[in-house]
């Protein structure tokens, strides 16, 4: 999925671009309206993410001109403008969503996936592709065969990425139902597919998606700080 991001704060733009790329999105950056027009003339995008207060045609003007040119690419606004008039204007221009700054970057990812990927039969995790209908697992485009028990556990975990799956639910898939047997099965599954499965003491197991591993807490906090700083600077300017 290819995304065009319009954001004139360079550090914020790079942080958001890196976060989206961890989710396997392809992201091009623009810092003003003119760059958007140039990029959209030469490339085709699946989604626009537009800030509003940018130079050389603001985000509202950019979407208006794109629509007038017959470009109906879905658009999400991200902005420090949180008044109802601005939000209404964004939707009236044809935006499909409007996210107020500061925001959790994962919220943006969740909204994108909910809009565009929720009907997909394929789940991706790192270099793994899993078809939830055929139960086929491909790792680096090579078909991987799992036993019935391991496949059942994998299916349960990957359908609930970043969520805790209760130990009791997973134990039901085992022939010999015990926490030790489950621990062994999970260990074999982790080693075979290079999965980041963690034991949540007293609860169960969680399969953490790649963004949660790579996007460290420090980097995450820096991102939120940049969003907050940009929002504060805008209101001071007002």
Image (cartoon, rainbow, N blue to C red):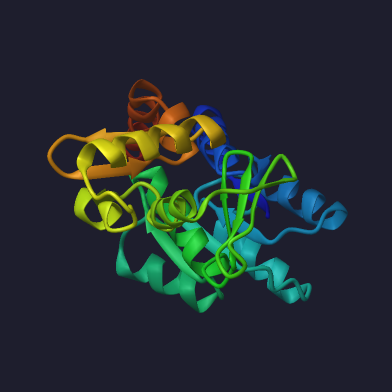
Q: Is any atom of residue 104 visible in this view?
A: yes
Q: In the rendered image, which quarter contains the N terminus?
A: bottom right
* Apparent side of residue 181 relative to residue 160 in the rendered image (left or right): left
Residue located 47% across and 52% down the image? 109
The residue at the far left in this view is: 202
The residue at the far top in this view is: 218
The residue at the far right in this view is: 42
Residue 184 position, x and y percent, is 35, 34
Q: Is any atom of residue 235 visible in this view?
A: no
Residue located 43% across and 58% down the image? 159
Residue located 71% across and 39% down the image? 140
Q: Nearer the viewer, residue 169 or 115?
A: 169
**Quarter of image, res 222:** top left
The residue at the far front in this view is: 176
Residue 223 position, x and y percent, is 40, 31
Residue 73 position, x and y percent, is 68, 68
Q: How many marks?
A: 0
| Depicted 10 relative to depicted 119: above or below | above
Q: In the rendered image, which quarter contains the C terminus?
A: top left
| Depicted 218 relative to depicted 128: above or below | above
* Apparent side of residue 54 relative to residue 201 in the rendered image (left or right): right
Q: Nearer the viewer, residue 13 or 213?
A: 213
Residue 63 position, x and y percent, is 63, 65
């Amino acid at each position: 999925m290819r995304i065009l991001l319009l954001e004139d704060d360079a550090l914020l733009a790079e942080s958001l671009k890196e976060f989206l790329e961890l989710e396997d999105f392809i992201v091009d950056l623009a810092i003003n309206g003119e760059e958007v027009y140039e990029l959209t003339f030469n490339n085709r995008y699946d989604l626009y993410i537009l800030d509003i207060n940018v130079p050389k045609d603001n985000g509202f003007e950019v979407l208006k001109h794109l629509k007038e040119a017959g470009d109906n690419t879905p658009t999400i606004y991200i902005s420090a403008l949180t008044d109802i008039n601005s939000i209404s204007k964004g939707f009236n221009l044809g935006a499909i969503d409007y996210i107020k700054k500061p925001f959790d970057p994962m919220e943006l990812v969740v909204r994108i996936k909910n809009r565009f990927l929720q009907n997909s039969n394929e789940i991706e995790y790192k270099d793994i592709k899993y078809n939830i209908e055929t139960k086929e697992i491909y790792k680096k485009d090579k078909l991987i065969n799992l036993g019935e028990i391991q496949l059942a556990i994998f299916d349960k975990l990957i359908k609930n990425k970043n969520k805790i799956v209760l130990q009791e639910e997973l134990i039901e898939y085992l022939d010999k139902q015990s926490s030790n047997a489950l621990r062994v099965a999970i260990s074999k599954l982790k080693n075979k597919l290079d999965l980041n499965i963690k034991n949540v003491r007293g609860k169960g197991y969680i399969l953490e998606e790649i963004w949660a591993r790579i996007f460290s807490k420090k980097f995450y906090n820096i991102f939120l700080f940049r969003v907050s700083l940009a929002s504060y600077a805008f209101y001071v300017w007002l």
